[in-house]
Amino acid sequence: MPSGRKPRAEILREYELTASAFDRWVRQNKATGSFKEADNKSA
């Protein structure tokens, strides 16, 4: 992981996320460039 970024496990603990929720969040951001749910819905 690039320097300056938190390890995945630390993020999961800090935000009380499951691994699957975090992975979905990352996929949505990569696909749309946004973390907003409304931006990630298809028509």
Image (cartoon, rainbow, N blue to C red):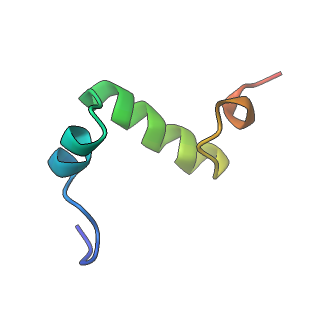
Q: Position of residue 39 (x, y in %)?
A: 73, 37
Locate residue 27 relative to residue 16 in the image: left or right. right
Residue in the image at 55% along x and 38% along y: 28
Residue 29 vs residue 4, the one in the foreground? 4
**Furthest residue in direction right, as rendered:** 43
Nearer to the camera, 23 or 6: 6
From the viewer's side, name the closer residue of 32 and 4. Answer: 4
Q: Is residue 21 left or right of residue 28?
A: left
| Residue drawn where x is 83% and y is 21% of the image | 43
- Residue farthest along the top direction in this orientation: 43
Find residue 5 and report its image quarter. Answer: bottom left
- Give the camera-side residue of 31 and 15: 15
Residue 33 in the image: x percent, y percent? 63, 52
Q: Position of residue 12 (x, y in %)?
A: 24, 40
Quarter occupied by residue 31 = top right
Is residue 35 depicted above or below 6 in this figure?
A: above
Q: How many marks?
A: 0
Extreme-bottom residue of the structure: 3
Up/down of 24 relative to 3, above or below? above
Q: Left or right? Give the position of 32 relative to 26.
A: right
In the displayed structure, 6 sits above or below 24; it is below
Reply above or below: 31 against 22.
below
Across and down, in percent, residue 32 comes to: 66, 46
Question: Residue at image x 72%, y 26%?
Answer: 41
Q: Is residue 11 left or right of residue 9?
A: right
- Residue at the image position 35 percent from the left and 36 percent from the top: 22
> Which quarter of the image is occupied by the N terminus?
bottom left
Query: Quarter of the image holding residue 24?
Result: top left
